Amino acid sequence: MAAEFGISELWDPAVRRDPHRFYDRVRDSGGPVLQVDPAGNRFWVIAGHADVLAGLRHPAIGHEVHRLCPGMQQPAPRQLSEAARIEARQLINLDPPDHTRLRGLVSGGFTARAVARLEPWITDLADQLVARARERGHIDGVSDLADPVPVNVIAELVGIPEPDRPRFRAWSAAIVSASIDGPAATVEFAAYLDKLAAQRRAAPADDLMSQLVAERGEPLDRDELVALVQLLLVAGQETTVDLIVNGIRLLLTHPEQWQALRDDPSLAAAVVEETLRYRGPVEIVPPRFALQELEIAGGRIPAFDRVAMSLWGANRDPAVFDRPHVFDIHRPDVRKHIAFGHGIHFCLGAHLARLESRLMFERIAQQLPGLRLAVDPADLDGFRLHQDGLPLQV
């Protein structure tokens, strides 16, 4: 069945406009589908809900393939650039035991109880943003509504002083863009964190940076510290902005759903979950490797090849979701989505993202009931809103 697919079809412009049709065909193909990315890397796409779940918890699918494959030895740290060293220590690129140790250092700050304490502060911020939007009339859904919440929340958690937060946001945008500016932004960000860490060692505060630099247990090395905070910045900022702005877009292009939320703002939590299912922030989990030859999703994947598990494909699987291609905030099966992943790499900030998004949708429904698109919906590229913006009229 794989012969029915173009070898690099996933990058075809027509497929990028509607990737869900591609994932529908992958699910129907009876096995993993081989694709080759623009850099020439082979990987196998899996898109069924049960198959993606199985892959996410499979002990023979992981990240640190260089530990097992002689031809993929990791260069010594001294041979890597500073940005590459930091990238190599990201949680999403690690397997146990390093992953377990590093995640344990920050997980306490993202429990449901810890996040709930932030609700009054986030509510006040959301109210300020919505009030400002109401005064302006014509706004951008990204820069005026979606973007300021997560960047300020993550900065507050980490302990970034308020005057420095615009730089914090600029670094995040450059790092996630995968452009030539990304490595330079990583180095600048690392230098900034070096200074902040030194300040917190000398005078601890009630923030995550102070906890990370405290001399307790096995200390973090410098690259691990930067990598941890950088991941919180990028993952906590970029994905939540995507969630909020796509939720706004979906509501405003589905008038009956938007009316339902305005009539009952307590449906905001349901809007969050259905947005996550219908168009979550992560299309494919960061590619992992088959650490040995394995059978999965009805087929065989060679040892050391990449495995691409599509959350978008899993969350539109008709075997799990009724009318999967319909956006419906009253959906009873929505909690079966896996937009935050599964297993040891389940999104650390899931509780926080849900809280931030719910509060924004509540406030928008209550205080901006006349909100509407300021452009023709046909002119929107639904997969690039974060970059292109979302013009709105209050």
Image (spheres, helix red, strand yellow):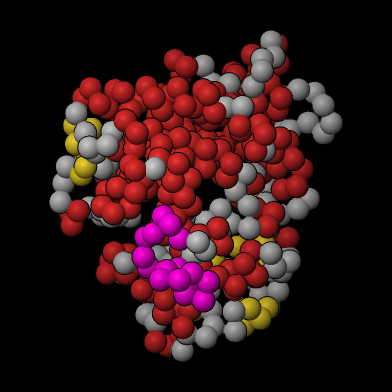
Question: Would you say 24 lies left or right of 383 here?
Answer: right
| Residue 362 percent location from the top left of the image | 41, 37
For the question of whether residue 121 can be seen, the reply is yes
Q: Is residue 318 magenta?
A: yes
The residue at the far top in this view is: 203
Task: From this view, report whether residue 227 is shown above or below residue 293.
Answer: above
Q: Name the spot of residue 246 as percent of width and height, x first.
A: 36, 48
Secondary structure character of the magenta stretch overall: loop
- On whether residue 348 falls in the magenta region, the answer is no
Q: Residue at x 41, y 55 (%)?
A: 329
Residue at the location (39% across, 43% down)?
264
**Figure check: 161 above or below 277:** above
In-front residue for pair 282/35: 282
User: Where 151 sits versus 100, above or below?
Assistant: above
Q: Position of residue 40 (x, y in %)?
A: 45, 68
Give the residues drawn in magenta, as a range. 316-331
Q: Residue furthest right?
A: 217
**Is residue 86 found left or right of 239 in the rendered image?**
right
